[in-house]
Amino acid sequence: MDGTVLVADDDRTIRTVLTQALTRAGCKVHATSSLVTLMRWVEEGKGDLVISDVIMPDGNGLEALPKIGRMRPGLPVIVISAQNTIMTAIQAAEAEAFDYLPKPFDLPDLMKRSARALDVKRRPAKQASAPRDSADDLPLVGRTPAMQALYRLVARVMNTDLAVLITGESGTGKSLIARAIHDFSDRRTMPFVVAQAADLQGLEGPATLLSRGRGGSLVFDEVADLDDEAQARIVRMLDMLGDNAPRIMATSQADLAGRMEAGAFRQDLFYRLGGVTLHVPSLRERVDDIPLLAEHFLARGERDFGAVRRLSPEARELVRAYSWPGNVRQLENTLKRLMVTSSEPEISRAEVEAAIGSLPLPEPMKGIGESDKLSASVARHLKRYFDLHGGQLPPPGVYGRILREVEAPLIEIALDATGGNQAKCADLLGINRNTLRKKITELDIRVTRRRKLM
């Protein structure tokens, strides 16, 4: 790489690591913990690339992007942030940041993106929209790779005219994704209409829907539940789209492709709705996001109910371990109830168990004796995982999820056993040291500073 990079982050360790890595790659680096200093450097014409945190002691890195764009059109900015929400990704995209990475980030990945940013000529950034009051109300929180990939895709398709199909289990937040796409798009001032089956009845039904959603967004909620006649009316309606037509979105917890193959869903409608498909993962597919969501809901409860509540370590462990068949909606409602019913600032494990009620609870790991092989113990827990779905198959991707659940504790225990020495840990596990570092980042393994700097 060749160029001058301006680094702004209030974490000295991150500044040091980025400075060393970029310098070794051939770049000149100016690093600061002050947004004011960063803006002065930009105004003075310094730098070919900016890498900036969002929350700084003297300002907000995202809010500074439009000013950077006006002062230095074409100067690429990579945003890094510990605020792992869909709002951060969307606001970064709106401000035309070159890229956005959540913390903790993978250093080799950031270096590759930095190299691309230095090589690519950027067009002038447009004015970013001001943060919206509704941002804190959307429980679209997550640092897991699945959620970060979803956020990036939402940001990319937000201002296109492509039809959007949003899939996922009940309670995952499909309707919230549809609302976010509308509220943070160029159509935000236009109508947002959720169509019901009754709206499609009669000769004038489809035309009335198009009129109501004119220029805005029209959402068909749980489109798989519509009968054949309603599906046919939607097809005819979509063929009538003209100027200033609404953006079409649909949600479904059913496997539409499977239903189409079985003849239970119209093929022509399936392909009209599937301009781009966004899959919202279940909580079982993003277990590491559960504590973040719990903190989000407790913070919102403090604002709504005026009561400060926190989960005890044992309660937090249970909340993370529970399967949450009702997904985010069930988690939110459970924590709301606990905010009201708990009389102490710290919510106990027993209170969480009572709030969950008669639903199945996870069992603690049994000790492995001489007569109990590891494979037998794992088999019991896998069997229980399948049983938790009440006779239904778990969502696709079981192999990857199970491997992730095994990898994380294995690496954590190996790191502890080797005193945090990553070289020894990699040798113990029989993997490359770079692979170990990548796994630590991907699995969001909490490590001490002597093990990892970010």
Image (spheres, grey):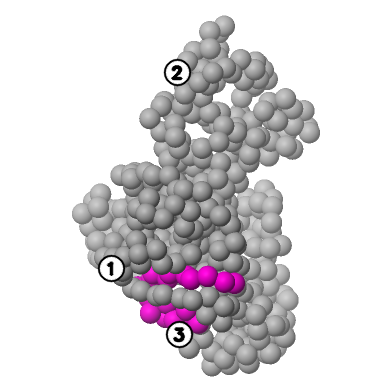
Amino acid type for the residue under numbered disc 2: Arg
- Name, please, the residue furthest toward the front: 45
Q: Residue at x 41, y 27 (%)?
A: 190
Q: CA distance from mark 1 to mark 2?
A: 45 Å
Q: Residue at x 48, y 53 (%)?
A: 74
> Relative to the observer, which residue lies in front, 249 or 158?
158
Amino acid type for the residue under numbered disc 3: Arg
**Residue 263 sits above or below residue 92 on the image:** above
Q: Quarter of the image holding residue 381?
A: bottom right
Magenta span: 1-21
**Residue 83 falls left or right of residue 120:** left
Q: Secondary structure at mark 2?
A: helix
**Residue 402 falls left or right of residue 212:** right
Q: Which residue is mark 2?
A: 212
Marked residue nearer the N-terminal end (2 or 3): 2
Is residue 7 inside the magenta stretch? Answer: yes
Mark nearest the camera among 3 and 1 is 1
Q: Is residue 84 visible?
A: yes
Mark nearest the camera among 1 and 2 is 1
- Name, please, the residue furthest toward the top: 203
**Residue 280 falls left or right of residue 96:** right
Q: Which residue is mark 3?
A: 449
Q: Position of residue 417 (x, y in %)?
A: 57, 91
> Relative to the observer, which residue lies in front, 46 or 112?
46
Q: Secondary structure at mark 1?
A: loop
Q: Which mark is residue 306?
A: none
Q: CA distance from mark 2 to mark 3?
A: 56 Å
| Mark 3 crowdedness (10 Å alpha carbons): few <14, some 14-19, many ≥20 | few
> Relative to the observer, which residue lies in front, 34 or 340?
34
Marked residue nearer the N-terminal end (3 or 1): 1
Q: Which residue is mark 1?
A: 57
Q: Residue at x 31, y 69 (%)?
A: 37
